[in-house]
Amino acid sequence: MELVVVHRPRVILRRKGYQIAKRLIDLTLSLLALPFALPVLLICAAAIALDSLGPVFFVQNRVGKGGRRFKLYKFRTMRHNLDTAGHRVFMKAFVNGDMDDKTNGNGVYKPFSDRQVTRVGRILRKTSLDELPQLINVIRGEMSLVGPRPNVPWEVEEYRGWHKERLEVLPGITGLAQINGRSSNTFDKIVRYDIVYIENRSLKMDLKILWETVTSVVAGKGAH
């Protein structure tokens, strides 16, 4: 299995009890959610298939804890067979901080145009339902419910040394950065939130982040 070199973080916390409890919460909540999530997953899958050509799921290699690569699952929200060269250039610049105010006019960083997102995809992104298939990644132990969002390998290649501290824990479906600005944050700011989480994480913090994520989605403050 390929690994990405990880620099030793400033603070390493090895709390076995917390790790075991966190894993139990991840599994319990994910398994309890499955009976309710399954009908939603089927409806989303049918809507995607009827709305546009292409696969229902978007599967992509991501870099997780310790630099290990895994396949992340999402619902497809973009049009099929798009040229992703522009997206790669944008994201590399985003990681490096070379954006020159490349936002959509509302202070939101977007590597794609609205025309590239399908009609159903807009709804899935707004409600964050496109992330629902990542429950599979959580059950498999590749992700946690809460943690830094995982990047693709070529984004990780652009990391500076201190960025790599975010690879010391399992990536998450949501995290501290996601409830504090989301797409309006620079990459450096996202990593700083991730480091604050890593160095202060607790079950109380995890549950608070999950609660604030749910209330944000219900209130319609989904991803842009």
Image: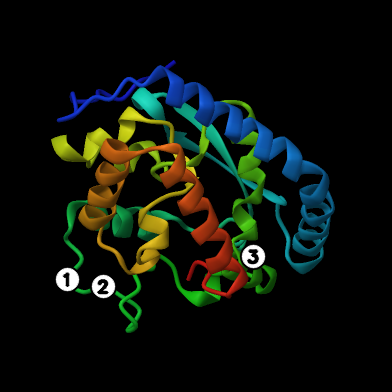
Crowding near pointer 1: few (<14 within 10 Å), some, many (20+)? few
Q: Which quadrant of the view contains residue 123? A: bottom right
User: Residue at label 3?
Assistant: 124
* Image height of 86 relative to 154, above or below: below
- Residue 70's place in the image compared with 46, above or below, is above
Mark 1 and mark 3 residues within 8 Å of each other at the beta carbon: no
Is any part of residue 142 visible from this angle? no
Question: Which kind of residue does numbered mark 3 sit on?
Answer: Leu
Residue drawn at (54%, 56%), measured in percent from left and top? 211
Q: Nearer the viewer, mark 1 or mark 3?
A: 3
Looking at the rendered structure, the secondary structure element under dot 3 is helix
In the image, residue 14 above or below residue 104: above
Q: Is residue 25 visible?
A: yes
Q: Is residue 33 left or right of residue 165?
A: right
- Give the camera-side residue of 157 and 126: 126
Q: Are marks 2 and 1 in contact (CB under 8 Å)?
A: yes
- Which residue is tagged 1? 100
Q: CA distance from mark 3 to mark 2?
A: 24 Å
Q: Is residue 188 left or right of residue 60?
A: left
Residue underneath mark 2: 102
Q: Please state the horizontal and vertical placement of residue 189, each as a whole percent of the image.
A: 23, 57
